[in-house]
Amino acid sequence: MRTPSGIDCPHFYGDYFRGRSIEECRLLKAAGQTWSPDLCKTCPVPGIARANACEHLQLKPVIGRPLSAMFMRRVQISAYCAKTRRNVKEPHIGCGECHPLPPIFDTSS
Ligand code: SF4
């Protein structure tokens, strides 16, 4: 569903039927965090969802105030793979278990 920032996000819910105006972020709600519409502007989740549709990827959001953002509230994401049971450094890419990158993208050597 489209967020107040105009970006599609699988975790946004809006109910505008018959004059209702209910909006919430179900990802933040499930994590016990308080959502406000401004958070969607800088949230990395829609980009992660577009880049990585792995069913095993679990996103854990935290609302922080990074120094680089001059203390504005921002959604910060950590990711976990439920299949390999390990943290995922790059949620846009994934852990590499189900969808390994071709060797041409390997930068470790
Ligand atoms: S805060 Fe992030 S995860 Fe929540 S609805 Fe907005 S864009 Fe989606």
Image: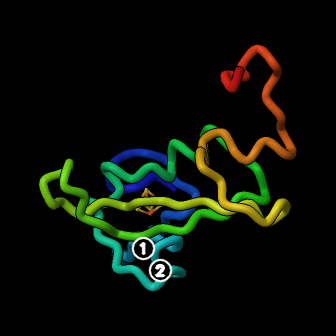
Residue at x 55%, y 68% (from the top left corner): 60
**In the orientation shown, which residue stands out farthest toward the left?**
70
For label 2, the crowd category at 10 Å Cα-Cα, with few meaning under 14, some 14 to 19 and many 20 or more, is few
Q: Is residue 6 above or below residue 79?
A: above
Question: For the residue with label 1, is its CB less than 8 Å from the closest atom of ligand 1?
Answer: yes
Where is residue 42? Give x, y as percent.
32, 49
Ligand 1's quadrant: bottom left
Horizontal side, residue 28 vs residue 4: left or right:
right
Q: Amino acid at mark 1?
A: Glu
Horizontal side, residue 40 vs residue 88: left or right:
left
Q: Quadrant of residue 100?
A: top right
40 vs 69, nearest the viewer: 69
4 vs 18, nearest the viewer: 4
Kind of element beneath mark 2: helix
For disc 2, the marked residue is 29
Q: Amino acid at mark 2?
A: Lys
Residue at x 33%, y 55% (from the top left corner): 4
Q: Earlier in the sequence, mark 2 or mark 1?
A: 1
**In the orientation shown, which residue stands out farthest toward the bottom?**
32
**Is there CB contact under 8 Å for labels 2 and 1?**
yes
Q: Is residue 59 above or below residue 99?
A: below
11 vs 78, nearest the viewer: 78
| Quadrant where the C terminus is found in the figure | top right
Kind of element beneath mark 1: strand
Where is residue 71? Give x, y as percent.
15, 60
For label 1, the crowd category at 10 Å Cα-Cα, with few meaning under 14, some 14 to 19 and many 20 or more, is some
For disc 1, the marked residue is 24
| Separation of residues labelled 2 and 1 (CA atoms) | 8 Å
**In the orientation shown, which residue stands out farthest toward the front?**
109
16 vs 85, nearest the viewer: 85
Where is residue 98? Give x, y as percent.
86, 44
Q: Quadrant of residue 58?
A: bottom right
